[in-house]
Amino acid sequence: MTDLTSTRINNDLTRPLLQTSWRFYALAAALGSIVLTALVAWMSQAYYGFGVTGIRWPVYWGFYVTSFVFWIGISHAGTLISAILRLVNAGWRRPVTRCAEVITVFALMIGAMFPIIHLGRPWLAFWLVPYPSERMIWPNFRSPLVWDFFAINTYLIGSVLFLLLPMIPDFAVVRDHSKGLRHRMYRVLALGWRGTPKQWHRLETAMQIMAIAIIPVAVSVHTIVSFDFSMAPVPMWQSTIFGPYFVAGAIFSGIAALILAMAALRRFLQLQAYLQPLHFDNLGKLLLLMALLWGYFVFNERLVVYYGNEPAEMAVFWRTQRESFAPLYWTMVVCNFAVPLVLMGIRRFRTIAGCVVASFAVVVGMWLERFLIIVPSLGAKYLPYTFGIYRPQPVEMIIAGATFAAMAFLYVLFAKVVPIISIWELKAGEHVSRESRPSVEESHLGQVQP
Amino acid sequence: MKAVYGLYPDGHAAQQAVNRLRAAGIPEPDITILSARPMEEYEFGRRDKGTWMWWFACLGGALGMSAGYGLSWLTETSWPIDVGGLPIFAWWPNLIIMFELTMLGAIVATAAALIASALVPSRGRTLYDSEVTDGQILVGVENPGEAAVHDIEVALSAPPGARVKSR
């Protein structure tokens, strides 16, 4: 690597941190105001009570649990994909990994808020914390909700560390290129990083161990979220296929979210030299693979229920296939299967624009999928007196919709504080692609050069 | 003089500087090397490769698993709840808690081991030049003896593109 290349990478990737335009403030203010609106809506829900929502017997899980499952699924964009690509040493991953890992952390944070939002009296949330007290509250370890708590928190802590550790060398770069208060701040964040061989080895070993540990955790998280449904005696929920079906759906929606985030970063931070068509092409192929896998799981789920012909399940089946939920169901199939199959399957359409269109469709389709798993089944359980309908109210729509703005808001703030592409990994990748393996083995093994 | 060091534009030159320092009799632990990226394709980049980090991760995992077992056993036996006829201490659901805490223990132990073993400065070594993050490779010696300074400067200035500095 030449100095010029290294300097250019430093300059390009630290520029968004060191220079701030009015566009940043405008975007942050716009997104922040949407988040603030949702906060007001949530406070009004807490003040007036849960009656302002459409959540009532028998459909107790509506937009909020749909959003919870959706955002936990989106979180699979980052750490899981990044860990797999690290372990298989995919060279093209380098500009992608941090963009992806950030999505994981923020999506988990947003997803984990929904159990609190779903409480009628959120200020008593601490009652759920199992500690020895006069209330004698103990966790029931046989409940999937307790498994959720452990799985999501393990994944969140692991993902935060997986994101933070490789940021340390980049904090050192910003430390060396900044002055004043910013310099002091990044000096603390860099934890005394100098770049000795020992530090590089330890960092790479740590990332390898964490990649190995985080993959089964990521798979377990969405499997356990699927247990929230599959362990309940509700039509079309009790399915052994729900674990892998949810994991596949999570990775699918995660890749779509990653493509959208990368396209936005590429455009707004002028990162065309780093986030290249090749990266979108590779992610587009992954999106195609996951669309096929998603189609396979949906076919399995539907065929087995249809063949079983159990009356309560068939009632839910027909509600989604050709009755009240059919428009949403077929929109979901088009968004999750037809659109990515056409746009990602035909090479000519697998451009950046094509990837963005397909990803947008998949994000919409996957949100609908979560909704269609939850609401039709809860509204038509085994006995007729449990039949009911769900009509989402404005407060739910505002809060659920504002989570997308919250995601963008957090992402924008993060990109202002941390290089959104891993500088040191990019330099290492540039080196590998520029030079064939040098003659070290011949001439640099402890011999003094003449 | 606290340190003498050279800045090199590429790994080949840095490797030559390291080799010349060794030839000048500088002990291996006294040679400081800093770079902006891992340089395992060079011999100097493979120094200090041995690590106990895998064992720390295993230890953290074992501690996490024990914590998971202890937490579920203690709470379930202290406040027994009958859930659908399952045993009070049911292995299948408890395995999920143990698995999650095992992985959490391994991950946290790995991060702690990294910070403790690589980020805490050793023996007051502080040699640094901000040009390292711009792609230069630093090879130097901290606190050299007065008698060795000349030999070190000669060794460091020999490779092509070298810029020798002292502080």
Image (spheres, grey):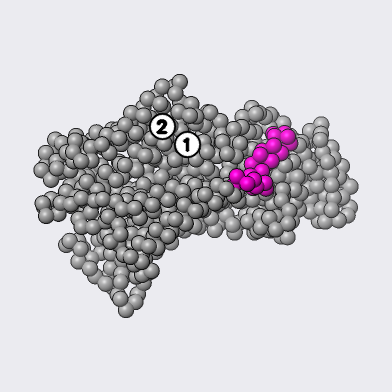
User: Is A11 within the magenta?
Assistant: yes
Q: Which residue is located at x 53 percent, y 28 percent?
A: A277
Describe the element under mark 2 as helix, strand or loop.
helix
Hey, which quadrant is residue B44 in on the image?
A: top right
Hey, which quadrant is residue A329 in on the image?
A: top left
Q: Which residue is located at x 14 percent, y 41 percent?
A: A314
Looking at the picture, which amino acid does disc 2 mark? Ala
Q: Which residue is located at x 11 percent, y 55 percent?
A: A385
The residue wearing badge 2 is: A358
Q: Main secondary structure of the magenta part?
A: helix
Q: In this orientation, which residue lies closer to the viewer: A221 or A366?
A: A366
Instruction: Please determine whether, in this image, residue A427 is positioned above or below residue A144.
Output: above
Q: Which mark is residue A440?
A: none
The image quadrant where one finds the C terminus of chain A is top right
Hey, which quadrant is residue A152 in on the image?
A: bottom left
Magenta residues, as a range? A1-24
Looking at the image, tell me whether mark 1 or mark 2 is earlier in sequence order. 1
Looking at the picture, which amino acid does disc 1 mark? Ile
The residue wearing badge 1 is: A259
Q: Which residue is located at x 46 percent, y 54 percent?
A: A35
Q: Chain of mark 2?
A: A
Q: Position of residue A302 (x, y in %)?
A: 21, 36
